[in-house]
Amino acid sequence: MKNAFVFPGQGSQFVGMGKELADNFAAAREVFAEVDDTLNQNLFQLMTNGPEYELTMTANAQPALMAVSMAAVRVLEKEFGINLKDKADFVAGHSLGEYSAACAAGVFSLADTTRLLRARGDAMQRAVPLGVGGMAAVLGLSYNDVSALVEACEDKDNICVAANDNSDGQVVISGHIAAIEKAVEIATEFGAKRCVKLPVSAPFHSPLMQPAAEVMARVFMEVKASPAQIPLISNVLATPITDEKEIIKHLVEQVTGSVRWRETMDYMHNQGVTDIYELGAGKVLSGMVKRAYKDINSASVCTLAEIEELAKNL
């Protein structure tokens, strides 16, 4: 039996996330309090009560999602005596979730991870003026087939790239808004079932994010990093690394690079992983596992009942 723990990315946030953990466990309350203190902001209040539009803002959503994931990790450790490094063969996270995975693996402290994600959210938001870039989900095409669509939408003034290879038949593209809108119009001509614009405020994981990558390279110089205690599968490599300098290098690359999530899951499957647990808000990643691999057990873990069930299984 092999276990992997995965951590959700942006889009999984919802008003009310983390409240049940905080109501039931001191360890969760401590995580939310430390994140609030680090940011000098009542982020937990925003997570609990909204408004939703404010929680959805990149600079808030990123540390908030990490906080919920780390609350689940700390509850397992402190309330159930289950340490991830004793139970996990791999960790991985989708986009910002890779920071949660790194924190869970002991690469960064909770406070430093919080600061990194606030800086990342701010830098990504500032990298491209509102309305200039966007993203869309292409459904029904493989990653290779999407490359032909992307080429048809690019020109000398407009960048368009495959940003997230999420699963077979679900690829997210990113770039200038004119290119994204063209892709939405013509995707069916390339065999896509449909192409849907995403409600995001910036073209994440595209070359347009280069200014944000430069900011993150500087911000990482200010944090202390340690080797990962659990092999961390990098978004941009789709293979595991433990060296902290390598992890930082690839987290900087990840700002402009593709999230190779389908290959990450394939790697885990090929390594004989039998159980994948999504720690944190939502069920996006565990849902992808269920659809793609009938021989892997997957579960999302965010509520009191789900944590108790996971503790029993482990």
Image: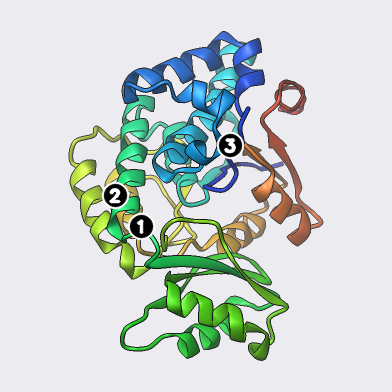
Which label is found at residue 255?
1
- Disc 2 vs disc 3: which is toward the camera? 2
Seen from the viewer's position, the closer of residues 299 and 163 is: 163
Which label is found at residue 88?
3
Q: Residue at x 53, y 47 (%)?
A: 9
- Label 3 SS: loop
Which quadrant is the C terminus positioned in? top right
Residue 243 in view in this figure: no
C-alpha gap between disc 3 and disc 1: 26 Å
Q: Residue at x 19, y 36 (%)?
A: 222
Which quadrant is the N terminus positioned in? top right
Q: Residues within 10 Å of mark 1 (few under 14, many from 20)?
A: many
- Horizontally, residue 293 falls left or right of residue 114, namely right
- Residue 7 higher or lower than 76, as above or below: below
Relative image position of residue 164 (x, y in whole percent): 52, 64
C-alpha gap between disc 1 and disc 2: 10 Å
Which label is found at residue 31?
none
The three-letter code of the residue at mark 1 reads: Val
Mark 3 or mark 1, earlier in chain: 3
Q: Are marks 1 and 2 in contact (CB under 8 Å)?
A: yes
- Residue under numbered circle 2: 123
- Horizontally, residue 309 falls left or right of residue 61, namely right
Residue 218 in view in this figure: yes
Mark 2 or mark 3, earlier in chain: 3
C-alpha gap between disc 2 and disc 3: 32 Å
The three-letter code of the residue at mark 3 reads: Ala
Relative image position of residue 115 (x, y in whole percent): 31, 33
- Disc 1 vs disc 2: which is toward the camera? 2
Q: Residue at x 70, y 26 (%)?
A: 303
Q: Residues within 10 Å of mark 2 (few under 14, many from 20)?
A: many
Q: Exactly how many numbered labels are in the figure?
A: 3
- Horizontally, residue 22 falls left or right of residue 124, namely right
